[in-house]
Image: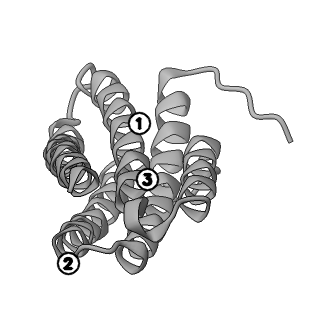
Amino acid sequence: MFEHFDTQEEVFGAKLSAALTMEHDSLDMLVELQDRTQRWELRDLFHAHASETRQQIDNIERCFQLLEERLRASPSPATKGLAKESRSMFLKTDDDVVDSALLAGALETELYEIGVYQSLITIAETWDDADDVVRLLTENLQQEVAASEKIQQAAEDVAAQDSAARET
């Protein structure tokens, strides 16, 4: 059935619901990345972000409670597509360089999540009595920004290591 939104609150609710699915999809992907990576430091990075993602799920669920909304998950076609693209890429990639493919998929997902949280915060900041919702979403946003910076640094390190290995 086609949904139609008449109010900003309905748009926000739909986006918050999709964010819940997004984080569950991300958690699944992070577990898969931990299993596929060739480097222990990346396994630790993905494991740490999976823990943060669990907290982000809790934060979104708390937002539903604060807004007195029924907790629901809506499809997140973007994260399903990002996960499918990432899986396709790393399944085609040799184990010697698979970490570069894993990091690319992880970074793309983080950047999408950052945009989702920015749009949710933008709406929630205009509402009276939504300070706690803004705080929880901002916490998620800050974690995503930090994760994207760590993943970017890891991608640069892996690229340099792989490049050096090719030269020897």
Foreground: 25 or 138? 25
Looking at numbered disc 1 in the image, what kind of residue is underneath it?
Tyr
Q: Secondary structure at mark 3?
A: helix
Say whether marks 1 and 2 touch (CB < 8 Å): no
Q: Secondary structure at mark 1?
A: helix
How crowded is the residue under tag 3: few (<14 C-alpha within 10 Å), some, or many (20+)?
many
Q: Secondary structure at mark 2?
A: helix
Q: Earlier in the sequence, mark 3 or mark 2?
A: 2
Residue 77, how many percent across, how many down? Answer: 65, 44
Looking at numbered disc 2 in the image, what kind of residue is underneath it?
Trp
Provide the residue designation for mark 1: 112
Residue 101 tag number: 3
Circle 1 or circle 3, nearest the eye: 3
- From this view, report whether residue 10 is shown above or below residue 109: above
Q: CA distance from mark 1 to mark 3?
A: 17 Å
User: At 24% across and 73% down in the image, what residue appears?
Assistant: 39
Q: Earlier in the sequence, mark 1 or mark 3?
A: 3
Provide the residue designation for mark 2: 40
Tell whether 150 sits left or right of 70: left
Report the coloring of the rendering: one colour
Foreground: 133 or 149? 149
- Name the image quarter holding residue 128: top left
Looking at numbered disc 3 in the image, what kind of residue is underneath it?
Ala
Residue 95, how many percent across, how many down? Answer: 45, 70
- Name the image quarter holding residue 48: bottom left
Residue 96, how many percent across, how many down? Answer: 39, 66
Foreground: 135 or 142? 142
